[in-house]
Amino acid sequence: MSHLYCHRGGDKGYDTKDFVQVLRDNNATHHVAQNNKNRSSAIDGRTTRHDGYKISIKIRKRIEETFGWIKEIGNLRKTRYKGVEKVDWHFTLTAAAYNLVRMRKLGVASQ
């Protein structure tokens, strides 16, 4: 019988013994952020020793920074617009602004 291997990501809220065990039982690699503040993490060395896990955590941080910027600077924590079309327009404009800021920072870093 062949096994389907897949990766499941999640934030620190998914770092529970039950969730991690279900993923292991289903041959899924869990790329869940470790929650080891004031408790022990359900994610152990079987996962954290792999380069793929380290890359996944690094990329997750970059994605979270993007959404944090959109919510704080782009004022999208609680939108002021009503209707899908207006909210979509606001999100698109905010994401474009973030991309311009990011491109500027990348350009400075590469020079």
Image (cartoon, grey):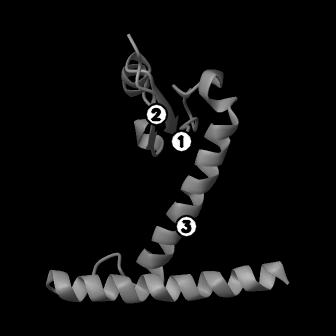
Task: Check disc 3 and report its element: helix, strand or loop.
Answer: helix
Q: Residue at x 62, y 81 (%)?
A: 102
Where residue 77 sits: x, y (%)? 35, 75
| Residue, disc 1 | 33
Q: Earlier in the sequence, mark 3 or mark 1?
A: 1
Amino acid type shown at disc 3: Glu
Disc assigned to residue 81: none
Mark 2 and mark 1 in contact? Answer it, CB < 8 Å: yes
Helix, strand or loop for disc 2: loop
Task: Measure how far apart labels 2 and 3 are at the Cα level.
Answer: 20 Å
Residue 65 visible in rendering: yes
> Which residue matches tag 2?
15
Q: Position of residue 14 (x, y in %)?
A: 41, 37
40 on left or right of 82? right
Rounded to the nearest angstrom, the CA distance separating label 3 from label 1 is: 15 Å
Instruction: Give whichever of discs 2 and 3 has the lower sequence position.
Output: 2
On screen, residue 15 above or below 2: below
Nearer to us in this view, 110 or 33: 110
